[in-house]
Image (spheres, rainbow, N blue to C red):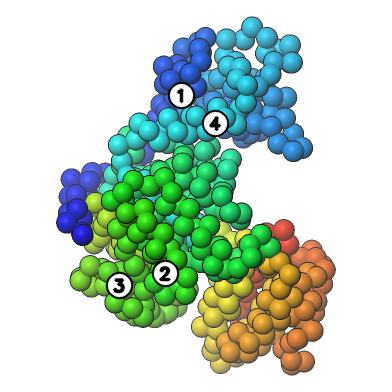
Amino acid sequence: MFEGLSMNSSLADKAHENFQGEEKIIWNKTSLEQALGCEVKVSFSACGVSINSRTIRRGEIFIAIKGENFDGNDFAFDALEKGASLAIVSGVDNNLLHDNKKVVVVKDTMVALNKMAKFARSRLKGKVIGITGSVGKTSTKEMLKIALENQGNVFATEGSYNNHIGLPLSLSKLPEDSDYAIIEMGMNHAGELADLTVLAIPDIAVITNVEAVHLEFFKSVSAIADAKSEIFNSMQAGGFAIINFDNPYHQILVSKAHNKQLNVVGFSETQKTPARLISYKLENGISHIKAELFGREYEYTINAPGKHLAYNSIAVLAATKIAGAEVDCAAYNLSKFHSVKGRGEIHNLKKITVLDESYNASPVAVKAALSNLGNYQSKGVRLIAVLGDMAELGVNSANFHKELVQDIIKNKIDKVFTVGAYMNHLHEELPKELKEAHTDTSEQMAEIIKKYVNEGDVILVKGRRTMKMENIVEALVK
C-alpha cells in the first residue's frame, strides 16, 4: 500500500526559490485568455491577484468581486491607478473604464475567479495537500509549510483564506512551478467543502478532527463528519486521506475515503496507526515530541505549547512523507514553528504571561486551551482564564458554555472572567471562589482585567471572532 512513498532526495537538496527582490510571473495574456475563454486586449504580466483595491500591489490583477455591502467594480479604476496590471470587472458604468485596454469585462467576476483557480490548479505538476478539520486547520497548514520550506517550492494559502472566496483567490495566486501547494479548506454548512474540493483537487487530504463546531447549522456531530468527508469528493483514486483515529467519528471518514478508493493513513496516540504520537512533554513553553512514522521513531520539538499541536504535527510528518519529501528535514524544521497570532501566541511580558487564543473558540478548542493553561501551574503563580462566547453551537449553546466549569476545575484554574451573553451561563455556574467579573463586551473587560492582574499571573484569553477578544490581549500587552 505504501510502495509509492519513496523519498525524493533531489527535492530535499533543492533550496526553496523565493525570488527575493523578484516577483514570480503567475499570469500573462495567453494564460488568462485560456483560463477565462475570452479576449484580453493588452499584453501584460502579473505577479498576483487581489480583490482589495486598498491593499493591491503593483503588478497584480484586480478582480472586482461584488459583496452584500460593496461592489468591487466601483474600485477598479483606483486599483489601476495604484499599478494593477489588469482589472476584471462585470460592468463598465464608470466612464474612466470605457475603452481601457487593461479592463476585461466578464458576466460574473466570481465565476471568472473560479475559472482562474481551476486553470492554476490544472497546470500544477506538484502535490496539493488539502487541510480541513473542526479546529487546527491554520496551525497545521503553517506547520506543514515550515516542514517543507527548504524541500522545494512551497505555496500555502495566506491566513485563513479558506472559504468560497478565499480558496479560489489563493489558488489563483498559485505559481505553476510549486512543488507543494498547501491549501486550507473551511466550511460551516454542508456542501461547502464539496464545492471547494472541485477547485483544489487535493492529492493528499488531512482532516485534523471532527468536533462540535457549527452545530447551529448541523443536526449532529456525525453530520459534521459527513460534511468534512466532502474533501474527498474530487480526489483521484489512489490519493491519500490522513485521518485522526482518536476522534470518535473517524470511522465515518474512513468509510467515505474507502468509497473513493483512497489510501487511509491514520494518526493516533492510542491506536496502532502508521503515524503515532508516542510521548509529549512541555518544558518552558516548548513541546518535546516523540513520534513513530511508518515504523521509524522521530524526536523533535515545537516552539509552542499544546498537545493538540503535537497531534497535528504527526499528521504533518505523514503528509510530508506521502508527498515525497524528507521526514528528517521536516521534523527538524518544526522547531521553528511558533503559534499563529491569536491561536496560542505567547506574550512573555516583564511581569505576566499572556496566552493569546483570541482568534476563535469552540468547546474542544477552549478545553484544549484550558489544559494548556493548567500546564503553567507553579508556586506563586495565578492561572487566570478570560473567556468570551463560543461560536455557532445552536440550541445547546448554553449547556456547552456551562460544561466548561468541569475543565476549569480539573486544570486548577484560579480565577475566571467571562465576556458575552452565552458566557454568562458559565459565569453563573462557576463556584464562588473562581468567579470574577462578567461583561458584555471585550472593551469593558479590557479596562477591568488590566487593573486586576498581578506579577507572575498567567492569563489565557479566548473567545469567538466576533467578541474581539484581541482588545483584551492588547490592553494586557500595553
Amino acid type at image mark 2: Gln
Dot 3 or dot 4, earlier in sequence = 4
Q: Which residue is mark 3?
A: 273
Q: Which residue is mark 1?
A: 35
Amino acid type at image mark 3: Thr
- Residue 157 lies, with reference to residue 103, above or below; the image says below
| Residue 170 percent location from the top left of the image | 50, 40
Left or right of 443 in this view: 301: left
Q: What is the C-alpha distance between the residues marked 2 and 1?
A: 39 Å
Left or right of 17 in this view: 26: right
Dot 2 or dot 3, earlier in sequence = 2
The residue positioned 68% from the left and 29% from the top of the image is 72
| Residue 440 percent location from the top left of the image | 82, 68
Image quadrant where one finds the N terminus:
bottom left
Dot 2 or dot 1, earlier in sequence = 1
| Residue 133 percent location from the top left of the image | 50, 61
Tell me where residue 368 sits by quadrant. bottom right
Q: Are marks 2 and 1 in contact (CB under 8 Å)?
A: no
Amino acid type at image mark 1: Ala
Q: Residues within 10 Å of mark 2 (few under 14, many from 20)?
A: some
Q: Which residue is mark 4?
A: 113
Dot 1 or dot 4, earlier in sequence = 1
The residue positioned 56% from the left and 63% from the top of the image is 223
- Residue 199 lies, with reference to residue 303, above or below; the image says above
